[in-house]
Image (tube, rainbow, N blue to C red):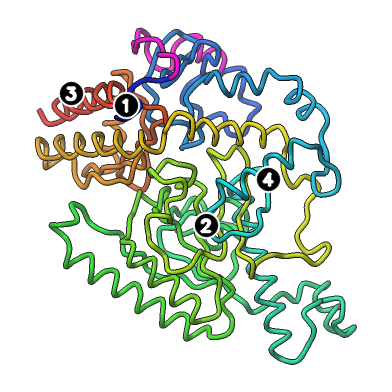
Amino acid sequence: MPNARSPVPGPSRKVHTELPGPRARELMATGTFDMQAFYRAAVVDDAASQGCSLVDVDGNVFLDMFASFALGALGYNHPALLKVAQSAAFARAAVNPTSTPFLTTASWFEFMHAMETRYAPRGMSKMFCVDAGGEGVEAALKAAFIVHGERRRVQSGGAADPLQLGDAAKAAIMENAGTDAVIVSFAGAFHGRGLGPMSATHSKLMHKADLPAFPWPMVTFPANRFPLEEHAEENALAEARSLAELAAVLEAYAGRVAAVVVEPVQSEGGDRHASASFFRSVQRLAHEAGAAFMLDEVQTGVAISGTMWLHEQFDLPAPPDLVTFGKKMQLGGFFASPDYDIHRFGRMYQTRNGDRARAMLALETLRTIDAENLLHNVRETGAIFLAGLQAIARSYPSLITEPRGRGFLLAFDLPTPAARDDFLTRSLKRGVFASYTGTRSVRIRPHLITGVPEVEEALAAFDAVAAEMAR
């Protein structure tokens, strides 16, 4: 049976003020020094919030189906995480920062041992930690370029080590001569806000406008239509076209492609899916081109799909070369296969390659996923949630379309961006906090502890909102 309840049930949902409420508006008015203040949707009472219940400073209580863009894993104030955070060891890790590659403590080795033996994706031999997911993508792209560049020098009869280059080549590097190597990515992708990841991002104009970008090629993503059984031929043709386009790009850039990067589900781009066979073919084409096959699991990793890493569901013939992580891991970074182990001194290094306090929370999160059988919960409860969304779509076919998902990676579409935003506003007033993605999709990202009662509550609210809008 799925895990039916939060560790400690949260308060019942209620919305008794306008949104934002008076206390929230008062606080927001004092926070305008923050450049991102105008994005703010709520002010959370993080003492009162519990389990799947998000409580704001005005006492409104929401069922959280947002989890801060999938950052949240175990709900609010999970006792296992509070126990770690209240420990003397955590306090010391928080107040005694270290340059982790050079100086660390025993807790870091406990974290690394657990990742190596239990939680890392199959076939990974190294882990590289930074502060957040987008930064992890940036680091993984660097690893791909480093390996690609070293291989090219060796293949041309030179030395892998850049310190053995001639004076002219060294001077050119220091004067930003750069490389003609490229990363291949997909339309609709989102890989982070750094200038490297942004060059592989193609989801929203506002992400990229006015920013310099590397001239890297982009390939169409197939974006399966749902229900799959009704669109089988259309989806197969879209995937075939995408793969043919990828093959042509790899041929056009022969010898220059450092990596092909793709999300197992394009989350920011609109929760867009492709089949397992598509990803197997992308991996094959990347390897035939001598490029890394890189999976961006920042949003799809750490149990939200029903497996620890979503790509485990693809039956890949070999492990990926690089897998990025973030969000629910509490810190960011990437895993690397043996071929992408960057071991030359100074090639991959930052002052703080890993926050020891965050690593302690990451390890306890992963152990709690095991202890509470949350992978099973996500699979079973996620299937119930998806079936409920499909039922609503059947009841309101002109309004709710294409419900889709894997585990708790769930979404559905409305006819227009305005209709989608109206749906979210009405849902919030009914006490259910969901979010947006793409141009007209509702994104649902429950905490991993979400049980059947919470799902039924969310479905009832969504059904009521759909009935209101359909009148």
Quarter of the view holding residue 11: top left
**Label drawn at residue 122:** 2
Q: Describe the element under mark 3 as helix, strand or loop.
A: helix
User: Do callouts 4 and 3 mark residues in contact (Cβ within 8 Å)?
Assistant: no
Residue lying farthest bottom? 157
Q: Which portion, as a residue range, is magenta? A: 7-27
Q: Check disc 1 and report the residue beneath it.
A: 425
Towards the viewer: 185 or 291: 291
Q: Amino acid at mark 1?
A: Thr
Quarter of the view holding residue 317: bottom left
Quadrant the N terminus occupies: top left
Q: Amino acid at mark 3?
A: Ala
Question: Would you say residue 443 is visible in this rendering?
Answer: no
Q: Amino acid at mark 2?
A: Arg
Marks 2 and 4, how far apart at CA: 15 Å
Q: Check disc 3 and report the residue beneath it.
A: 464
| Position above or below: 290 against 300 | below
Which residue lies at the image location 18% right of the left edge and 52% below the top edge? 227
Mark earlier in primary sequence (2, 4): 4
* Residue 223 is one of the magenta-drawn residues: no
Which residue lies at the image location 14% right of the left edge and 36% below the top edge? 391
Residue 57, percent from left and from top: 50, 11
Mark earlier in primary sequence (4, 3): 4
